[in-house]
């Protein structure tokens, strides 16, 4: 916490919300207090609506209630004044505990809880941000849908759950994850939250590629595919549809791991490989073979120079839909 910055924010917050001025002493209090308290807090005399308090500006991001209660008692005993905790962040758990124990606090532009002055103002609270090394399968699926079909920009989770194989809750979490990775903005229109991608086409693909993984969850061998439903051609044979690479003898097919869970026996000697994907390849391609972007992700780590050359050829051949 930068004490000068938080002091300015505190004054502005009270002025904007309550239309009152806050007086804060320029000099920090120097008191005979335990070192643990001196290390954790800045202490200032403050005056709100004619009432004198000790402003306890906290170093810690989210202080513990039990620890804070003890420190508050020591500060109040030493100064003879009640305290107000000044924070730049508070978790929902701490907020609940502080209110239950009537610990006065202010988080500028978020919340003000001052029971002495009969003030309990609740503004907005920080959303939980999801940030991972790789995107979840649902987020990856959404981005690929947008890149290939260009039909989900400016749509809400409520609208998308009607046309995609995911629930509104799953899609809402994907929206949050995509926004957290700064790939898109979320625009609120009434009760709807709509996704707006910041980039498009090849520019978007190059940005998200480091966050994407192969959709293959498991590779199994089968001796026939006649009874397997909803399969798509994958592997080198699919790559041959997008480039000049030759087909291979052993065929590879892809399907959603949810579609055929009964396929779980591994056969050592077989004619076919089946990739069980984390998302359904049928939603991403209207052809007999898988979409080029998911295919790229399944083969991008191949050490075969022919494959790497063909992948580049495939990406160059895509007619990206730009804004």
Image (spheres, helix red, strand yellow):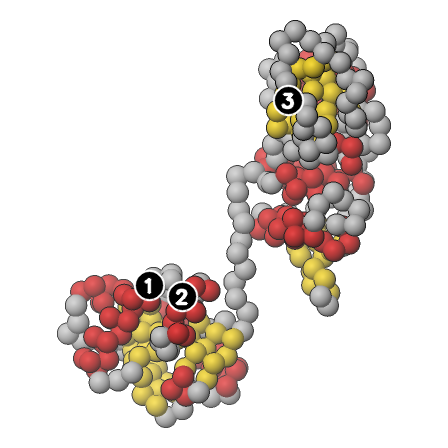
Query: In the orientation shown, which residue stands out farthest toward the right?
Result: 287
In the image, 84: left or right of 93?
Answer: left
Label 3 environment density (alpha carbons within 10 Å; few <14, some 14–19, many ≥20): some
Q: Quadrant of the N terminus?
A: bottom left
> What SS does tag 2 mark?
helix
Label 2 environment density (alpha carbons within 10 Å; few <14, some 14–19, many ≥20): some
Q: Position of residue 282 (x, y in %)?
A: 78, 32
> What residue is shown with label 1?
64
Query: In the orientation shown, which residue stands out farthest toward the front?
Result: 262
Q: Which residue: 21% across, 63% down?
A: 36
> What residue is shown with label 3?
264
> What residue is shown with label 2?
94
Q: Is residue 301 above or below residue 104?
A: above
Q: Quadrant of residue 299?
A: top right
Q: Which residue: 69% across, 52% down?
A: 168
- Whole-angstrom CA distance, mark 1 to mark 2, is 7 Å
- Whole-angstrom CA distance, mark 1 to mark 3, is 49 Å
Q: Is residue 208 above or below residue 305?
A: below
Q: Which residue: 20% across, 80% down?
A: 77
> What SS does tag 3 mark?
loop
């Amino acid at each position: 916490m930068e004490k000068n910055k938080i002091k300015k924010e505190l004054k502005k917050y009270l002025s904007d919300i309550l239309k009152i001025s806050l007086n804060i002493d320029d000099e920090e209090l120097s008191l005979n207090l335990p070192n643990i308290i001196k290390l954790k807090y800045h202490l200032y005399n403050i005056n709100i609506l004619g009432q004198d308090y000790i402003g306890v500006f906290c170093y810690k991001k989210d202080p513990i209630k039990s620890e804070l209660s003890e420190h508050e008692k020591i500060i109040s005993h030493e100064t003879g004044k009640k305290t107000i905790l000044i924070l730049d962040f508070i978790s929902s758990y701490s907020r609940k505990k502080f209110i239950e124990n009537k610990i006065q606090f202010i988080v500028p532009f978020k919340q003000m809880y001052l029971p002495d002055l009969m003030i309990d103002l609740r503004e907005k609270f920080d959303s939980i941000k999801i940030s991972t090394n790789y995107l979840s399968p649902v987020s990856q699926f959404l981005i690929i849908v947008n890149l290939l079909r260009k039909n989900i920009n400016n749509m809400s989770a409520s609208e998308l759950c009607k046309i995609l194989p995911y629930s509104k809750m799953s899609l809402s979490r994907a929206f949050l994850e995509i926004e957290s990775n700064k790939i898109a903005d979320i625009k609120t229109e009434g009760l709807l939250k709509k996704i707006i991608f910041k980039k498009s086409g090849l520019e978007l693909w190059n940005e998200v590629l480091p966050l994407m993984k192969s959709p293959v969850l498991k590779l199994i061998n089968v001796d026939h595919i006649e009874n397997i439903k909803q399969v798509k051609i994958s592997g080198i044979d699919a790559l041959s549809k997008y480039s000049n690479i030759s087909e291979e003898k052993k065929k590879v097919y892809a399907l959603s791991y949810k579609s055929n869970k009964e396929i779980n026996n591994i056969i050592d000697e077989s004619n076919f490989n089946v990739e069980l994907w984390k998302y359904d390849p049928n939603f991403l391609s209207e052809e007999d073979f898988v979409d080029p972007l998911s295919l790229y992700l399944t083969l991008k780590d191949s050490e075969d120079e022919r494959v790497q050359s063909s992948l580049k050829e495939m990406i160059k051949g895509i007619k990206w839909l730009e804004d």
